[in-house]
Image: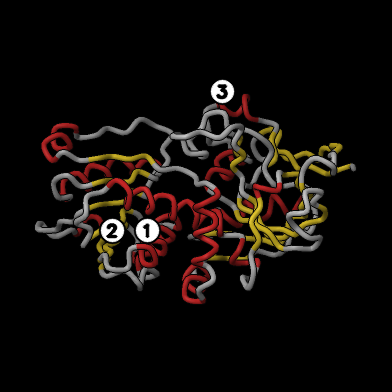
């Protein structure tokens, strides 16, 4: 079966490749909707180290996707069934390393081709069905699953005092973390700290919001999520360590290409726990899809989405990546190639 694959060859240059896929081994899925992640954008723009780019490329981008089954020889899914695609493909099970941290796992649009293809061949156990969820919402399941994973890990490792939780950041990652917190830890009071008043206004379901340069001197909280990333990660971590209560847990989620200084003296004095949290696994996807059965959750997620025009040709791929640079949160699009 001949398949079209749209691979990034070098920054801002995509070529169409042809590959042969075997329909007898994996399920075959036709993508319906995709969403652009900051990681995809960094590859597209060439905002990664040149050594990394030369190692990864050429590679098809996008790891946030929902689609419909074309064929599944395992009999798990029916033809035409709507599914979300799990980008993490573990090589082997482990008793103590989660699939999203296993170095032998493959991750779409990072260590193997992403979903920008005419058809995607993928193991059937990397698919989950979605019912009664519009594809414009289902395509966000990967993003929500990342937040679910982090909140789940906080619930596992943090001490039991969880009355006040702070979320640093006012972008889409902070927003989706707050969505997950409201559903999974409904008793906790959520405070969001950001730099942009307009973005902060979207967090209407949080208990409080502050600009990062206007924090009260007596501002304290039990645990925190760092969702800033980039050049401001260090500043955010510094503020978190300053204001968090002793023995709090900090979930580090923001990605930075540069080294970040950490105030180890105060971190040690307070006995803090810092946990890195990245990507997600199949269980997190299942929880995310369950949360998205709620109209309330779908509405909240929908408020940060900009749906661009469908992608019907190669030029449209360049357009959606350009559009994404000018949208404040998430860009999704229908895949018609």
Looking at the picture, tell me which residue is in the foreground, 215 or 204.
204
**Residue 16 lies in what quarter of the image?**
top right
Task: Give the mark, 2 or 1, whose residue is nearer the N terminus.
Answer: 1
What mark, if any, has residue 170 been given in the picture?
A: 1
Give the left or right position of residue 65, taking residue 149 as reference. Answer: right
Q: Residue at x 66, y 40 (%)?
A: 12
Looking at the picture, tell me which residue is in the foreground, 255 or 183.
183
User: Judging from the image, what secondary structure is the residue with disc 1 in?
Assistant: loop
Q: Are marks 2 and 1 in contact (CB under 8 Å)?
A: yes
Q: Residues within 10 Å of mark 3 (few under 14, many from 20)?
A: few
Which residue position is annotated with label 3? 51
What mark, if any, has residue 193 been given in the picture?
A: 2
Task: Give the mark, 3 or 2, whose residue is nearer the N terminus.
Answer: 3
Residue 282, percent from left and from top: 55, 49
Residue 191, percent from left and from top: 26, 63
Task: Give the mark, 1 or 3, whose residue is nearer the N terminus.
Answer: 3
């Amino acid at each position: 079966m001949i398949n079209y694959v749209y691979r990034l060859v070098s920054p801002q240059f995509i070529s169409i490749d042809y590959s042969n896929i075997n329909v007898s081994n994996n399920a075959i899925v036709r993508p319906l909707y995709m969403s652009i992640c900051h990681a995809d954008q960094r590859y597209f723009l060439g905002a990664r180290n040149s050594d990394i780019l030369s190692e990864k490329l050429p590679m098809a981008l996008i790891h946030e996707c929902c689609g419909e089954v074309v064929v599944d020889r395992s009999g798990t899914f029916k033809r035409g069934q709507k599914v979300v695609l799990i980008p993490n493909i573990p090589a082997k099970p482990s008793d103590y390393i989660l699939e999203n941290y296993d170095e032998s796992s493959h991750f779409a649009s990072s260590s193997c081709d992403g979903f920008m293809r005419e058809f995607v061949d993928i193991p059937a156990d990397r698919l989950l069905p979605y019912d009664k969820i519009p594809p414009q919402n289902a395509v966000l399941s990967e993003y929500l699953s990342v937040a679910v994973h982090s909140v789940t890990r906080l619930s596992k490792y943090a001490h039991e005092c969880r009355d006040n939780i702070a979320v640093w950041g006012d972008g889409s990652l902070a927003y989706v973390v707050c969505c997950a917190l409201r559903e999974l830890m409904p008793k906790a009071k959520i405070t969001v700290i950001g730099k942009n008043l307009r973005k902060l206004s979207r967090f209407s379901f949080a208990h409080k919001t502050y600009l990062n340069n206007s924090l009260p001197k007596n501002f304290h909280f039990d645990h925190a999520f760092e969702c800033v990333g980039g050049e401001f990660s260090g500043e955010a971590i510094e503020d978190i360590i300053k204001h968090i209560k002793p023995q709090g847990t900090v979930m580090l989620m923001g990605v930075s290409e540069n080294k970040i200084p950490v105030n180890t003296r105060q971190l040690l004095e307070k006995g803090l726990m810092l946990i890195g949290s990245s990507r997600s696994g199949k269980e997190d996807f299942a929880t995310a899809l369950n949360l998205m059965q709620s109209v309330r959750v779908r509405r909240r997620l929908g408020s940060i989405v900009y749906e661009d025009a469908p992608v019907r040709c190669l030029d449209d791929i360049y357009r959606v990546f350009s559009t994404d640079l000018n949208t404040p949160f998430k860009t999704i699009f229908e895949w018609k190639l």
